[in-house]
Image: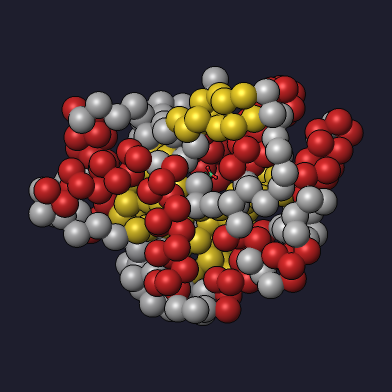
Amino acid sequence: MQYEEIIDIFWEEYLKTTPSAGKIHELLEAKGEKISNDHIAFRTFNHPSINVEQLAKPFLACGYVEKDDYVFEEKKLRAKHYEHPDVDAPKIFISELLLEEFSEKLQSLILKKINEIPLGLMATNATIFSGRPWGTISHETYLKLREESEYAAWMYVYGFCANHFTINVNQLTSMASLEEMNSFLKANGFAMNVSGGEVKGSPEALLEQSSILADKKAIDFAEGSFEIPSCYYEFARRYEGANGQLFNGFIAKSADKIFESTNAG
Ligand code: OOG
Ligand code: NI
């Protein structure tokens, strides 16, 4: 598969769970913008059969290469980012929850679901395309997981999908800054993630990021239907470093706050 096909598959699914992304796309297109993606992000657990390296396989197979890795001590996460030789290809950011750093209870609840993933999916490296590949979920369990980790609870409900796409703000012609992008979003009724400030990072850090809060989706649990934060849209503006090259990495301190775009409270 070419990388474009893979990205298209995730984009189609993402639009269904994140109607705001489609609306923002249309609003920018109406201003004559051609939108390009800075990066796309995925989440998982550090279990050997579905960890970052396992999920990255379809991307490596179409030419992506591993770049940097990141640690999020407080949230108990680790992540890596991947780049493709085609400069138009979005970067891929994959994070994983470090299960052993949580309670035995959380570990057993998650392991039970991981054990329900069809072996064929894992054998063909198709897990990343599988959405939620485990059986019925319980709202009580969701709430229990949230006590320890919003990330674990989100993963339990949504599983494998593009958690967010990110608009490359450098390439927009009608928005000179991230502040302008944010004003445009707010004027159109979108709620921003304000954790750590509306704009995370700085020109000195070579990366500025902002994001809207995740949309909400009605999810069927064993106990009935509940609205749960789904996926969000991110906006990134990159700067050139001393070497005259655009910075292509991520900033752990900013990412730490971006993760909170899917928090339920
Ligand atoms: C990823 C959050 C981090 C970034 O660009 O720093 C991130 C997530 O919410 O899964 O995407
Ligand atoms: Ni991101």
* Residue 123 appears left or right of 131: right
Considering every residue shown, the one lying at the far right of the view is: 104
* Residue 2 appears left or right of 68: left
**The image quarter in which residue 52 lies:** bottom right
Rendered residue at 55%/32% (across/down): 219
Q: Position of residue 68 (x, y in %)?
A: 58, 62
Rendered residue at 25%/42% (across/down): 24
* Residue 101 appears left or right of 255: right
Q: Position of residue 260 (x, y in %)?
A: 52, 32
Q: Is residue 251 visible?
A: no
Q: Position of residue 162 (x, y in %)?
A: 50, 52
Q: Position of residue 75 (x, y in %)?
A: 66, 36
* Quadrant, the C terminus: top right
Tell me, what colour scheme is on the image? secondary structure
Rendered residue at 16%/52% (across/down): 29
Identify whether 17 is placed above or below 166: above
Rendered residue at 29%/46% (across/down): 22
**The image quarter in which residue 145 lies:** top right
